[in-house]
Image (cartoon, rainbow, N blue to C red):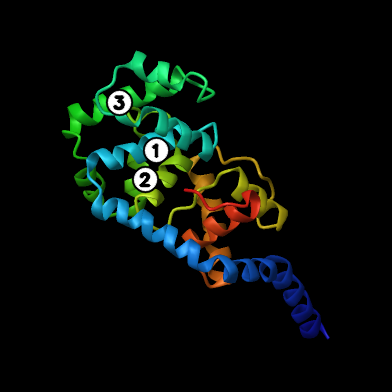
Amino acid sequence: MTGANNRVKKTLYEKKHYADLASSYSKNKTLIKIRLKEFKDIYKQGDDQRLFEELCFCICTAGASAKMGIRSIDAIRDVLHDGSLKQLQKRLRGVHRFPNKRPTYIVHTREYLKKEHGFKIKDLIKSFKNPMERRDFLAKNKNVKGIGYKESSHFLRNIGFTGYGILDKHILNTLYERDIIESPKPPSTRNRYIVIENKLKQFAEDMNVSMDELDLLLWREKTGVILK
């Protein structure tokens, strides 16, 4: 009887966690895979300036939204690489909720990458063989302004590196609603981030999809769109 009860509980658990998502994944699988290929192409085909644009997108997305990040980059794309702080701030007024602070982060990060790394962003990213060290470099680096573990993960995913969990509010709320984590509160430490990331990874394995695919799927379930 105990074994039968456990099987029933497991069936109910799987139904709650996977059935609806499995159906949605089947419908959106093609678009999700296309989007992930687009991310990989950014690193393969893009130059250092293109990678910097993605980094700036994540700087603008932090504390805001992906849509605001996209609008912000559209507004400053032509002056990202050589524009002054005042130029960037002027362009983002009425576009971003932090029109003064985000340009400060962008200019500081840009000048740091130029001075310390010759703006060879692709070579810098490629120099890290360990995925965790690659993300730690970005998240812990005080000269890469405005991003922590979430947006460092976001940036790396957006340029085609796989296996990073982007623990934004949509993902955290989904994990909480499905009883996978105890609180939707954003993780405040590296260790806590990794704990939740591993739960997301296990969720993906249980669904037999990659964590990157699951991320886009969960994001689509919450927002109705698959952005970046």
| Residue at numbered disc 2 | 135
Label 3 crowding class (10 Å Cα cut-off): few <14, some 14-19, many 20+? Answer: some
Residue located at (66% from left, 69% from top): 18
Marker disc for residue 79: 3
Whether residue 218 appears in this view of the structure is yes
Q: Is residue 209 above or below residue 149?
A: below
- Which residue is the extreme one toward the left? 118
Whether residue 181 appears in this view of the structure is no
Label 2 crowding class (10 Å Cα cut-off): few <14, some 14-19, many 20+? Answer: many
Looking at the rendered structure, the kind of residue marked 1 is: Ala
| Residue at numbered disc 1 | 139
Label 1 crowding class (10 Å Cα cut-off): few <14, some 14-19, many 20+? Answer: many
- Element type where label 3 sits in the image: helix
Looking at the rendered structure, the kind of residue marked 3 is: Val
Looking at the rendered structure, the kind of residue marked 2 is: Arg
State yes or no: discs 1 and 2 in contact (Cβ < 8 Å).
yes
